[in-house]
Amino acid sequence: MIGNEGIHALSETLKTNTTLTGLILGDNLIGNEGTLTLSEALKTNTTLTTLSLEHNSIEKEGALALSGALKTNSTLTTLDLWGNMIGDEGALALSKSLKINTTLTILILGDNSIGNEGTLALSEALKTNTTLTTLDFWMNTIGNEGALTLSEALKTNSTLTRLHLGENSIGKEGALALLEALKTNTALALWTCGGT
């Protein structure tokens, strides 16, 4: 585990590195402090396209820092935050950057304690975002209300091709709303909803 000291050194390197395109940092106890440092580097890095921060105890503060970086970063295409704790407030922060960012295509937010409020914010961003193709919400706490807001976004979004909603709390009402949205959405090719 590289921890905070290692992530600080790595972040300094990222500010000037011109060759590294992928960084997989899962299970490294990076936390909010390390994420803040890494986010500062992302504001100036021009080569990194993939960043995986799975299982790093990142909370809303870390998500807020990443959101700030995504507003200016123009190379990152994949951000994997699986298994952190960003919650609704973290999702809200990321949704703001999705309204501005034009390069991110894959966003993985599975197992992050995101509920209806966070889903609403991300759904609003999906109405205007034209680059995101994959959104992973697997294993959160999204209910019918969140599914309804997602279904509204799917009626206008024409770029999302993969949406993962398995292991949530979506009931019949939410599932039917999503199915109704698929009647007009011609872009979505894969929708997973198992275990909800």
Image (spheres, rainbow, N blue to C red):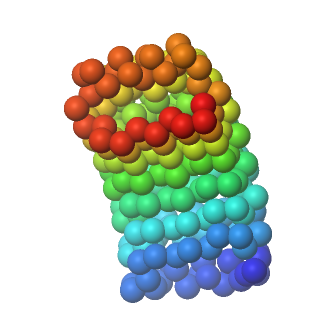
Residue at image x 68%, y 77%? 7
The answer to whether residue 134 shows anywhere in this view is yes
Residue 159 lies, with reference to residue 37, above or below; the image says: above
Q: Nearer the viewer, residue 110 or 172?
A: 172
Residue 192 at what x, y percent from top left?
46, 40
Q: Nearer the viewer, residue 193 or 41?
A: 193
Residue at image x 27%, y 28%? 185
Residue 135 lies, with reference to residue 6, above or below; the image says: above
Q: Nearer the viewer, residue 169 or 37?
A: 169
Where, by quadrant of the figure, is residue 151 drawn? top left
Residue 125 at what x, y percent from top left?
43, 34
The answer to whether residue 97 shows anywhere in this view is no
User: Which residue in the rendered view is the most extreme toward the top?
Assistant: 173
Where, by quadrant of the figure, is residue 78 drawn? bottom left
Residue 89 at what x, y percent from top left?
67, 37
Where, by quadrant of the figure, is residue 145 drawn? top right
